[in-house]
Amino acid sequence: MSRRINLWANIDWITVMVYLLMIIIGWVSIYSAVYNDDHQSIFDTSQRYGKQLIWMIAALLVGAAVLMTDNKFFFFFAYPFYTFTIFLLIAVLFLGTEVNASQSWFNFAGIQIQPAEFAKLATALALAQYLSTTKRKIHDVRNLLTAGVIIFLPVLFILLQPDVGSSLVFFAFILVLYREGLSGYVLFLMILFGVLSVLALLMNEINMLALLVGTSFVSYFAVSGKFKVAFKAILIFFFCVIIVLLFFRLFSPDTVLDVQLIIGATGGSLILLLLALLYRRNNAAMLAGLLIAAILYTYSVDYVFDNVLMPHQKSRINIVLGFDDDPLGQSYNINQSKIAIGSGGLAGKGFLQGTQTKFNFVPEQSTDFIFCTIGEEWGFAGSLMLHALFIFLLFRLIYLAERQRSHFARIYGYSVIAVFFFHIVINIGMTIGVVPVIGIPLPFISYGGSSLWAFTIMLFIFLKLDAGRMGSLR
């Protein structure tokens, strides 16, 4: 009995209090978002707010059960749970229920469960177990590839549903790899290719190619400081491009100019790469390799955008980039959300007084767009307080993660932080129109049992690991 009392005493009750405050804010916000005059009781289980209360009570019971579970359970059952989750992701493709054009849900007696939400939890546990095992050095290529498979295997099956929004969340785990020693260059490359993705959609092919080539040569000159070498490299590169253009002019004049330039630039970059390796100029080799990768990646972005994405996904991206304006179509949700948030002013219109909310102008307002309800009714002040609460939670979890003795607990803690961070930034970014709408919930605030349960279990497992941090887990 004394041991159990000590464990409960070691629970970080500050985080628990923040969690309780957040789910109450979410419950009240859902009540306001779908308020019905004919069902005024917030406990009415025929309405979403009543159902959310049931999810909340169930989540608290599950959280309590997690806190009473031995820490070793989470370590030793990480792989089996991950395997079971992969099985569920496959099964839902055949046995699932289609909701909003995505077959992502199991329906059990009217209760809908989304396996993708629990896949994030399973991935966090499996990644923590793998990386915490003795001699798992993240710099080793084999270990890095294995970690990548653990992270992105669920993505494959989630994309088949298709649920692009949930699949993108798994990229947050790369931040965990960075914390565990992944080179900052890798993180820089990810940011670089993210920027390239946006530029590839904003600029035409020729201007993009010129930007990449120019940036590469300027970067090489800045790094090496050797003007003559940089000048020779420029001459060799453009000589190769001209040779390729002349070849197509003579033997295949009907070939599209963009294709000719891609082949010429890639060929010129390959020759520079070979020369750099031959003369052992590491900086030149690295930049030439980056140039080749950037060229190929840039044009693959255009291909994926034109041939892989569905029309509504392309429309959402074009709206964010400013190419399209579809006020009654794909832009509708974002426009109405921004109107709702902006109309809240400094202090908001007051509880249940939001006109955008009351007249159902914003679709999915209790789920993906729950933040606009808070912005309209509680204004800038209320929105700022919610932001402060999320920031406090994230920094509190970072503090807890850094004090762990166990590698498993620390890695798992940072996995939880990364997932929460991604959801918060992207969800709020959607509602204010700075990122495309990809349909992911706001942790502890949005309506939904699967997301609330998954977020609760993720958080409480970490709190349990933290409470037993003096133990012998790896």
Image: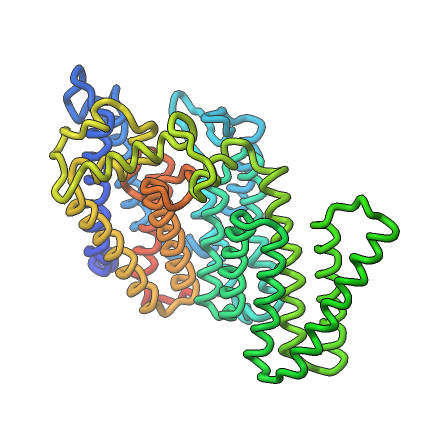
Residue 237: percent from the left, percent from the top?
Answer: 72, 69
Tell me if residue 373 can be seen.
Answer: yes
From the viewer's perspective, is residue 50 above or below residue 204? above
Residue 315: percent from the left, percent from the top?
Answer: 49, 35
**Number of marks drawn:** 0
Quarter the N terminus occupies: bottom left
**The one of 403 and 319 positioned closer to us in this rendering:** 319
Tell me if residue 58 can be seen.
Answer: no
Quarter the C terminus occupies: bottom left
Q: Residue at x 45, y 61 (%)?
A: 176
From the viewer's perspective, is residue 310 above or below residue 468? above
Q: Residue at x 64, y 49 (%)?
A: 300
Q: In the drawing, does residue 320 fall left or right of residue 352?
A: right
Residue 285: percent from the left, percent from the top?
Answer: 67, 74
Q: How is the image coloured?
A: rainbow
Residue 275: image quadrant is bottom right
Q: In the drawing, does residue 407 fall left or right of residue 235?
A: left
From the viewer's perspective, is residue 368 above or below residue 6? above
**The one of 154 and 279 positioned closer to us in this rendering:** 279
**The one of 186 and 285 positioned closer to us in this rendering:** 285
Q: Residue at x 77, y 66 (%)?
A: 240
**The one of 69 and 22 positioned closer to us in this rendering:** 22
Q: In the drawing, does residue 377 fall left or right of residue 175?
A: left
Residue sticking out furthest to the right: 251
Residue 137: image quadrant is bottom right
Residue 274: image quadrant is bottom right
Residue 391: percent from the left, percent from the top?
Answer: 26, 56
